[in-house]
C-alpha cells in the first residue's frame, strides 16, 4: 500500500482535500448554495452546538452523497457486546485473564467484539465499557459507527488498516487510535488480530494538563496523526452500515460506499498515536511516582481531577531512584484499574500476566507486586537501570465501579482462579517486638 499521509496535531482545526479534487473545500463559508464538484455539505457535531469554544468539536464533510441515503435500520444480533452490567453478581476479587482467544473462523472486527466489563449507560451519556476484539478477516462492504461514545483502540496483535470518512490510517501494536462518536469506519486485517477497546460514553479524550511539568512532555500534541481526505465513488454495490445505538447493534443497507468524503475541515477527527513517542517523566531522586505520570489521554468527569477513564502506559524508561522500593507499591484505590499487556511482561507480575490477557483490580481491592517482585525489588542493587525494555503494559483507570459481564466472567473461559496465589507467601518480615 502507498505510504499514507497524515495531519499532525491534537484538537487542531484541520482541513483536507483528496488530491484528485483540488479546491473541493468551499472557501469562506460552510454551506454554499452549490458546493464544488456537486458535493453535499454535512456537519458532524461531536459536542453540543453551544459547548465552550475550548471543548467545541465539529467537522464539515463534503461528500458525494449525504449519509442519510440509507434504508431503515434493523436490529441485528449483538456480537457479544453488551452494556448490561447486571449479568453477574458483583465480585470484588482481583481478576486475571489469560490471553483472550484469537478468531477461530472467518471473523471481522465487528463480529469479534466482546465486552469484558464496564459501568454506566450511554442513554445518560455517563460511563464506559471495556471490550476486546479478535478478527482475521476484513470488513467486506461493511462500515461501523458508534452512536454511544468514543472508541480508544489498542491493538495487541496484527495491524488494523482503517478506512474512515476522513481518510485511511494503519494502526499497529504499540500504536493506538481513537475513533470518536458517529464516525464511520471499516477495518481490514490480513493476519490474526487482537486488541482492547476502551469506550467512553460521555465526553471526548483530552491530553492531560501538564501543571508544573510545563508546556511540553508526556504525549506531545504534534505526535498525534489524523488521516487525510480520501474517497471512493462506488455505486450499486450494497453496503451495510452497522450502528451501535444504546448498546445494541443495528444494520442498514445502502447502495454506495460511506467513504465518499472528498474534502473536510474541522476539529472533530479520528487520530492515532505511536506509544513509543511518549516522553516519560519520573522521579530522579527517590520513591515511586503515582502512575498518573504516564497518562496518555484522559476522559474527564465533571469532578475536577477525576477521570471517567485515563489511558495510562508503562513505557520503557530509566529507573534511577535511590533508597527506594522501585516496583509499583502495594495499593488500594478509590478508582478501578483494568490493565492489559501489548508486549513483553509487566514488572510487577513477570511471567503470570501475558500479552493479550488482562487484570482488573476493582475499587478498594488490594493489589501490588507479587512475591517474587517484592523479593527482587527489596534486594536489587539500586544502580541506574533501563526497565520495561521491549515491553508495553497499559491501564484503563476509572472512577467508576466496573461490573464484569457474563462473557468476561464465564463464557471466555480465561479468568484465572489461581491469581490470588501470587500474593500468598508474602510473609511477615517484621523485626519488632512480638
Ligand atoms: O500495577 C498496578 O496495579 C498499577 C500501578 C502501577 C504503579 O506504578 C503504581 C500503582 C499502581 O496501581
Ligand atoms: Fe493500583
Image (tube, grey):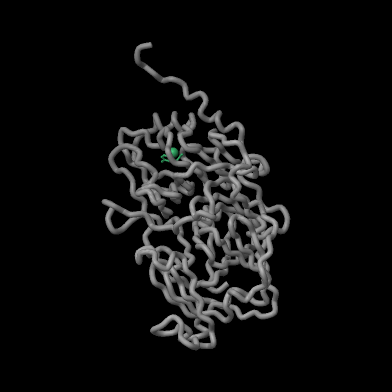
| Camera-nearest residue between 380 and 133 | 133
In the depicted structure, whether residue 433 falls above or below residue 216: above
Ligand 2 located in image quadrant:
top left
| Camera-nearest residue between 206 and 98 | 206
| Residue 37 pos. (x, y %) | 53, 88
| Quadrant holding the N terminus | bottom right
| Residue 415 pos. (x, y %) | 62, 38
- Which residue is farthest right? 105
In the depicted structure, whether residue 102 falls above or below residue 93: below
Q: Which image quadrant is residue 330 in?
A: top left
Q: Residue at x 59, y 41 (%)?
A: 97
- Counting labels gives 0
In the depicted structure, whether residue 53 falls above or below residue 148: below
| Residue 16 pos. (x, y %) | 46, 77
| Camera-nearest residue between 67 and 323 | 67
Q: Residue at x 56, y 37 (%)?
A: 95
Q: Residue at x 43, y 34 (%)?
A: 332
Q: Is residue 98 left or right of residue 271?
A: right
Q: Is residue 399 left or right of residue 212?
A: right
Q: Residue at x 39, y 49 (%)?
A: 294
| Quadrant holding the C terminus | top left
Q: Which image quadrant is residue 287 in?
A: top left
| Residue 217 pos. (x, y %) | 33, 56
- Which residue is farthest top? 434
Amino acid at each position: 500500500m502507498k505510504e499514507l499521509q497524515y495531519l499532525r496535531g491534537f484538537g487542531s482545526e484541520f482541513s483536507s482535500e483528496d488530491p484528485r479534487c483540488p479546491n473541493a473545500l468551499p472557501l469562506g463559508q460552510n454551506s454554499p448554495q452549490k458546493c464544488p464538484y456537486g458535493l453535499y455539505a454535512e456537519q458532524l457535531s461531536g459536542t453540543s452546538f453551544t459547548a465552550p469554544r475550548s471543548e467545541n468539536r465539529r467537522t464539515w464533510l463534503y461528500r458525494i452523497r449525504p449519509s442519510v441515503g440509507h434504508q431503515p435500520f434493523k436490529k441485528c444480533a449483538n456480537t457479544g457486546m453488551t452494556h448490561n452490567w447486571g449479568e453477574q453478581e458483583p465480585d470484588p476479587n482481583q481478576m486475571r485473564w489469560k490471553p483472550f482467544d484469537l478468531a477461530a473462523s472467518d471473523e471481522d472486527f465487528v463480529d469479534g467484539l466482546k465486552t469484558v466489563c464496564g459501568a454506566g449507560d450511554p442513554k445518560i451519556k455517563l460511563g464506559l465499557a471495556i471490550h476486546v476484539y479478535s478478527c482475521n478477516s476484513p470488513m467486506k462492504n461493511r462500515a461501523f459507527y458508534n452512536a454511544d461514545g468514543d472508541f480508544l483502540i489498542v491493538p495487541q496483535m496484527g495491524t488494523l488498516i482503517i478506512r474512515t470518512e476522513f481518510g485511511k490510517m494503519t494502526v499497529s501494536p504499540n500504536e493506538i487510535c481513537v475513533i470518536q462518536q458517529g464516525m464511520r469506519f471499516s477495518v481490514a486485517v490480513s493476519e490474526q488480530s487482537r486488541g482492547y477497546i476502551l469506550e467512553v460514553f460521555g465526553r471526548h479524550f483530552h491530553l492531560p494538563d501538564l501543571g508544573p511539568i510545563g508546556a511540553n512532555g508526556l504525549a506531545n500534541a504534534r505526535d498525534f496523526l489524523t488521516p487525510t481526505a480520501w474517497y471512493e465513488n462506488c455505486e450499486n454495490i450494497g453496503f451495510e452500515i452497522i450502528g451501535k445505538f444504546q448498546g445494541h447493534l443495528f444494520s442498514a443497507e445502502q447502495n454506495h460506499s460511506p467513504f465518499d468524503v472528498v474534502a473536510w475541515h474541522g476539529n472533530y477527527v479520528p487520530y492515532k498515536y505511536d506509544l513509543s513517542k511518549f516522553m516519560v517523566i519520573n522521579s530522579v531522586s527517590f520513591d515511586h511516582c503515582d502512575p498518573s505520570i504516564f497518562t496518555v489521554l484522559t476522559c474527564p468527569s465533571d469532578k475536577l481531577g477525576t477521570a471517567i477513564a485515563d489511558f495510562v502506559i508503562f513505557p520503557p524508561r530509566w529507573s534511577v531512584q535511590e533508597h527506594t522500593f522501585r516496583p509499583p507499591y502495594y495499593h488500594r484505590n478509590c478508582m478501578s484499574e483494568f490493565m492489559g499487556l501489548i508486549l513483553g511482561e509487566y514488572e510487577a507480575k513477570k511471567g503470570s500476566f501475558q500479552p493479550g490477557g488482562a487484570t482488573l483490580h476493582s475499587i478498594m481491592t488490594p493489589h501490588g507486586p507479587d512475591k517474587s517482585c517484592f523479593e527482587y525489588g527489596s534486594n536489587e542493587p539500586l544502580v541506574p537501570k533501563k526497565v520495561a525494555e521491549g515491553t508495553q503494559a497499559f491501564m484503563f483507570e476509572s472512577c467508576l465501579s466496573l461490573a464484569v459481564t457474563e462473557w468476561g466472567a464465564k463464557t471466555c473461559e480465561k479468568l484465572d482462579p489461581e491469581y490470588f496465589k501470587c500474593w500468598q507467601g508474602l510473609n511477615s518480615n517484621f523485626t519488632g517486638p512480638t
